[in-house]
Image (tube, rainbow, N blue to C red):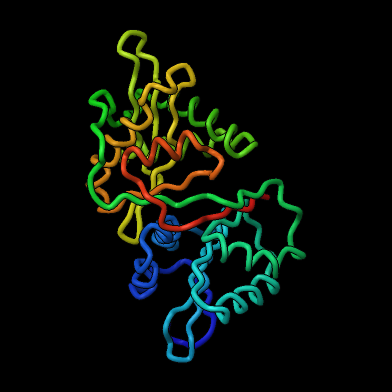
């Protein structure tokens, strides 16, 4: 992995210099780094690495279920575009820093079908340190005995957020993986024992972890359960990485206010194009 220009990597251990490049922006590249860590085990994933004339990395793009670019030069962007024109990759979304996503899409949109949805503004939030508020002592790591309820509320949330129902088998398998790794947290109503809060540490990489799927039962919203649950997760998550991150749709004002109360601040702007 030392040649100038574009290199396509599949089914191998990725060199440390790629991870070093991604670690220069931990929150921004957390999800990409987490996917890259699994490249050797994934038969259907590709990593595209671009180097300048000094052999310095200026772009890393993961292509699998999603296309996730981390591009720092125009030359790297154009090289990626040429590569995409020469292949017939299929992916469900393009997600990354807003400017990169739309610069890329402007050059390749004629190659793909019309998007079914576009999230133009998704603030990326970060918390480097402790929560500003107290956590909820009832929030704890889920176990496999909680699996059915975790899957049920997770699918409901995904469907509402993304606009389509996820594959049940895939979603259940992913839930088993996260629960087994101690990366799904829940709380229950003390009286009914119903799950009323759920969230996942969905990705770990580049020196950060990314929080996914923060959900509060609609009947319990407006009571601070989401903020307190995330505060607990922030402290819990330090065992995985020192920096907490998440992203949220700009129009979700309630969620943004909740995360701000915990101490999260905006560090970048993401965008997602769904197919």
Report which quarter residue 40 is drawn in. bottom left
Residue that protrudes farthest toward the bottom in the picture: 53
Total marks placed: 0
> Residue 236, percent across and down?
24, 40
Query: Is residue 78 visible in the rendered structure shown here?
Result: yes
Residue at the image point whose x is 57% and y is 51% from the top: 121
Up/down of 230 relative to 267, above or below: above
Residue 180 shows up from this direction = no
Residue 206: which quarter of the image?
bottom left
**Image position, residue 231 (x, y; %):** 29, 36
Question: Residue 237: x and y, percent?
Answer: 27, 44
Where, quadrant-wise, is the N terminus in this rendering?
bottom left
In depth, the one of 27 and 50 nearer the eye is 27
Q: Is residue 182 above or below residue 47?
A: above
57 vs 88: above or below: below
Q: Is residue 167 left or right of residue 212?
A: right
Q: Residue at x 47, y 78 (%)?
A: 58
Residue 75: image location, x then y, percent: 57, 82
**Front one among 139 and 8:** 139
Return the residue nearer the eye: 36 or 248.
248
* Up/down of 220 relative to 125, above or below: above
């Amino acid at each position: 992995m030392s040649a100038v220009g574009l290199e396509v990597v599949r089914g191998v251990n990725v060199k440390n210099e790629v991870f070093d490049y991604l670690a220069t922006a931990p929150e921004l590249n957390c999800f990409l780094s987490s996917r890259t860590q699994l490249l050797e085990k994934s038969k259907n994933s590709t990593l595209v690495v671009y180097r300048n004339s000094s052999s310095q990395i200026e772009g890393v793009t993961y292509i699998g279920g999603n296309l996730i670019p981390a591009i720092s030069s125009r030359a790297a962007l154009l090289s990626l575009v040429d590569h995409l024109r020469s292949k017939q990759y299929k992916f469900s979304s393009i997600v990354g820093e807003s400017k990169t996503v739309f610069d890329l899409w402007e050059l390749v949109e004629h190659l793909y079908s019309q998007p079914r949805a576009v999230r133009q503004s998704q603030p990326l939030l970060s918390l480097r340190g402790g929560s500003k508020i107290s956590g909820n002592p009832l929030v704890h790591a889920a176990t496999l005995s909680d699996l059915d309820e975790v899957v049920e509320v997770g699918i409901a949330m995904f469907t509402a957020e993304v606009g389509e129902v996820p594959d049940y088998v895939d979603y259940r398998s992913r839930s088993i993986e996260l629960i087994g790794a101690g990366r799904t947290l829940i709380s229950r109503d003390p009286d009914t024992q119903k799950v009323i809060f759920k969230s996942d540490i969905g990705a770990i990489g580049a020196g950060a972890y990314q929080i996914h799927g923060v959900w509060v039962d609609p009947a319990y919203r407006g009571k601070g359960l989401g903020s307190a649950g995330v505060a607990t997760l922030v402290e819990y998550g330090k065992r995985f990485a020192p920096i907490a991150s998440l992203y949220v749709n700009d129009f979700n004002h309630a969620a943004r206010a909740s995360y701000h109360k915990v101490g999260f601040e905006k560090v970048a702007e993401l965008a997602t194009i769904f197919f």
